[in-house]
Amino acid sequence: MQYKLKIGKSQRLYKIAKGLIPGGTQLLSKRPEMFLPDLWPAYYSKSKGCRIWDLDGREYLDMSYMGIGSCILGYADKDVDGAVKKAVDRGSMSTLNAPEEVELARLLIGLHPWADMTRYARSGGEAMAIAVRIARAASGKDVVLFCGYHGWHDWYLSANISHDKALDGHLLPGLNPKGVPRYLKGTSYPFRYNDAGNFLKLVKRFKDRIGVIVMEPVRNDPPQKEFIETIARAAKQLKAVVVVDEITAGFRLNTGGAHLIYGIKPDIAVFAKGMSNGFPMAAVIGKAGVMEKAQDTFISSTYWTDRIGPAAAIATISKIKKENVPHHLGKIGLMVQEGWKDAAAKNDLVIEVSGIYPLGHFSFIYKEPLVLKTLFTQLMLERGFCASTVFYASFAHTETYVKRYLDAVEESFGIIAKAVKSGAPVKYLRGPVCHAGFKRLV
């Protein structure tokens, strides 16, 4: 398959959207400027498995984010969609509560024997805000130490009030805290993943003011034993609540939280994305002594009580367990990462591959990495793939699809190698260079 890139219905609609929606989209990670400015097919007409059709009817194989990590089983999975359709037919909302809430709570707690109670939300960012609120209520202290990316809410962005580059090492550089009250300055501080010394400096600096420690269970590399043990000791000494953000990693390495694999013992764990295969759902699970503090504050929202989210989550988690989906994700992810390395070696390209197998990514190790990233996306789109320097594996990705993808990668890497040797790779682009992180659109 070979497409001639052109401005179509999707691109024209996005131009209209930028005049109607601040930023053009609801999610930074879905902005076309993050992929291939002017030419990325911003909108889809339908999706199935790991295939997407744009508004002009062009079909692409999604070898990138799979709904920004939300579709762990693949798009429009028949089992999950079937459960959701039944929930819709029975009424997605009423004055009474959906019994699926209790069923899902039992399921999540059964997978995590350390946990006793569950609260729900419908997105990862708000679930993290809930978790931090509960943790502060339980500890009675305001200061949060965190590592990793944890959403858009005030508690997190307040770290950039005191230092506008504080969050630059946490996936999205340039996040602006405008609109975040300045009195929140000094309430959240980041530490580096797997850097016990950096963490202890903050502990020494803020001591008894620390009430919450937030971390992802795994980033590009597994957590070091010393790092985990240092956090556990400090939390015990400070009587701080440990929150593990499983929004990205959860259900990809095992059926449940990745913290179970690495021996991390949290007080709270937060799930979203992979737990409900594209339907809005999030969960905050935790120990009873901590979770009960939710009753001492006010955490409540109408649409956290709908039936669709829990029904989708129950069906998704059940299928993940039944089909051993994490094993498949690992196998497919490894195949892709090894394929990147082989294709780069054959074309004398220097890349760096990192990330757990289900969530792999690579970087071009050259002076103009964004130019080469944009060129890769452009070349792959011409060959019928939605692709970037990231690959999120799903149950719908087969070895046949991966082989097709890697053939296109090798071909594209060959052209990129020529572009590098030319000394002016930007001349190979058909539009602007992609954005690196948060950037205001004009």
Image (cartoon, rainbow, N blue to C red):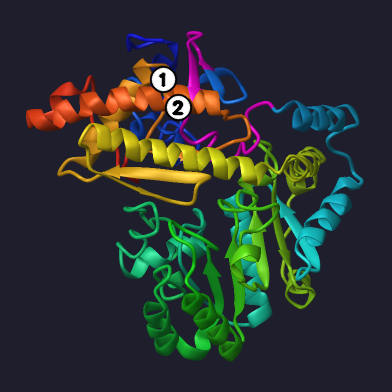
Residue 284 in the figure: left or right of residue 10: right
Query: What x and y, as percent, mark residue 259?
Result: 62, 64
Report the amino acid beneath label 1.
Ile
State the extent of the magenta-drawn residues as a range. Answer: 53-76
Name the one closer to the observer, 52 or 338: 338
User: Can the viewer see residue 442?
Assistant: no
Report the amino acid beneath label 2.
Leu
Q: Mark 2 falls on what kind of element? A: helix
Image quarter in which the C terminus is found = top left
- Identify the residue at horizontal 31%, vertical 33% (top origin): 343
Residue 394 in the figure: left or right of residue 34: right
Query: What x and y, as percent, mark residue 238?
Result: 56, 88
Residue to which mark 1 is pinned: 16
Residue to which mark 2 is pinned: 20
Residue 350 in the figure: left or right of residue 27: left
Q: Mark 1 falls on what kind of element? A: helix
Name the one closer to the observer, 422 or 97: 422
* Residue 323 badge: none
Q: How far apart are labels 2 and 1 at the CA level? A: 7 Å
- Identify the residue at horizontal 74%, vertical 54% (top origin): 120
Residue 427 lies, with reference to residue 325, above or below; the image says above
**Secondary structure predominantly adopted by residues drawn in magenta:** loop
- Within 10 angstroms of label 2, few (less than 14), some, or many (20 or more) residues? few
Most distant residue in the left direction: 423
User: Can the viewer see residue 167?
Assistant: yes
Residue 282 lies, with reference to residue 67, above or below; the image says below
- The part of the image, by quadrant, that contains residue 366 is top left
Instruction: Check if mark 2's residue and mark 1's residue have beta carbons within 8 Å.
Output: yes
Residue 338 in the figure: left or right of residue 228: left
Query: What x and y, as percent, mark residue 404?
Result: 45, 21
